[in-house]
Image (cartoon, rainbow, N blue to C red):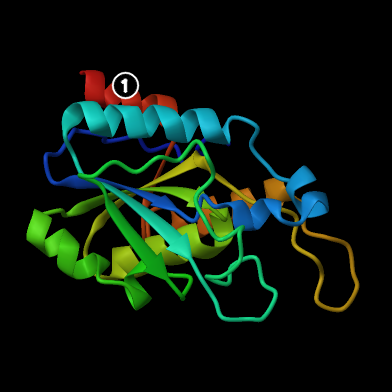
């Protein structure tokens, strides 16, 4: 989704940045009906391109897997679905974390690892746009990190109304997330813009 703000992007490459790939796991595909309504058909391609760029630059890549202990949940550690999608292949130098909260920072050692690495900037991608991705961006922004929220490298699904009203469509979810984050917790960027900044 195009950035709504008129202010120019400032995407100077920083050696103290890390790519955060949140919850790109089979758990979301366990319910085929929900997966069929997903946003962003370019998600896999955009995340793959960002991973390749960070690998080439030697900057840290952090993969996150969400878990819960609800019996029968596709997020339960014993579920065959609770694993990264096949196209997500962490390498030995990458960091892999497992979380139980929507913010990665709230239930993992991410903050400590970032301090060890000297990282002050987070590039956020993953599933879902308005849940774990947005919540992590808010938390990181409050903790003083520079946050680049790569909207077209996130993915989400329509939200059911709590009392039976109409679903909230994905484009409205994405638009609301961008409005809530921009200028407060994160800078809204797109994959092509971010990659172009690295090539300059």
The picture places residue 103, in percent across and down from the top left corner, at 42, 69
**Residue 167 drawn above or below residue 199:** below
Residue situated furthest top in the rendering: 200
Q: Residue 4: in sight, yes or no? A: no
Q: Quadrant of the C terminus?
A: top left
The picture places residue 29, in percent across and down from the top left corner, at 69, 51
The picture places residue 44, in percent across and down from the top left corner, at 54, 34
Is 59 on the left-hand or right-hand side of 134? left
Is 178 on the left-hand or right-hand side of 52? right
Q: Residue 45: in sight, yes or no? A: yes
Mark 1 highlights which residue?
196
Total numbered badges shown on the rendered structure: 1
Instruction: Tell me which corner region of the image, top left, top right, bottom left or bottom right, holds residue 6.
Output: top left
**Residue 121 drawn above or below residue 55:** below
Q: Nearer the viewer, residue 64 or 102?
A: 64
Is 85 on the left-hand or right-hand side of 97? right
Q: Nearer the viewer, residue 177 or 71?
A: 71
The picture places residue 191, in percent across and down from the top left corner, at 43, 31
Instruction: Tell me which corner region of the image, top left, top right, bottom left or bottom right, holds residue 1.
Output: top right
Q: Nearer the viewer, residue 49 or 9?
A: 49
Q: Which residue is at 33% across, 28% downward?
A: 52
Q: Which residue is at 23% across, 59% downward?
A: 145
């Amino acid at each position: 989704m195009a950035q709504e703000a008129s202010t120019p992007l400032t995407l100077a490459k920083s050696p103290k940045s890390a790519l955060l790939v949140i919850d790109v796991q089979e758990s979301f595909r366990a319910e085929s009906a929900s997966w069929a309504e997903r946003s962003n058909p370019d998600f896999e391609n955009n995340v793959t391109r960002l991973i390749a760029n960070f690998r080439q630059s030697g900057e840290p890549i952090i993969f996150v897997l969400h878990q819960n202990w609800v019996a029968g949940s596709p997020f339960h550690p014993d579920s065959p679905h609770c694993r990264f999608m096949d196209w997500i292949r962490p390498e030995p130098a990458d960091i892999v974390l497992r979380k139980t909260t929507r913010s990665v920072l709230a239930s993992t050692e991410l903050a400590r690892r970032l301090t060890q690495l000297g990282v002050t900037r987070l590039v956020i991608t993953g599933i879902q746009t308005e849940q774990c991705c947005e919540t992590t961006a808010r938390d990181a922004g409050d903790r003083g990190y520079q946050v680049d929220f790569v909207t077209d490298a996130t993915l989400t699904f329509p939200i059911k109304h709590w009392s039976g009203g109409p679903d909230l469509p994905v484009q409205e979810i994405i638009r609301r997330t961008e409005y809530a984050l921009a200028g407060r917790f994160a800078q809204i960027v797109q994959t092509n813009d971010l990659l172009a900044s690295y090539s300059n």
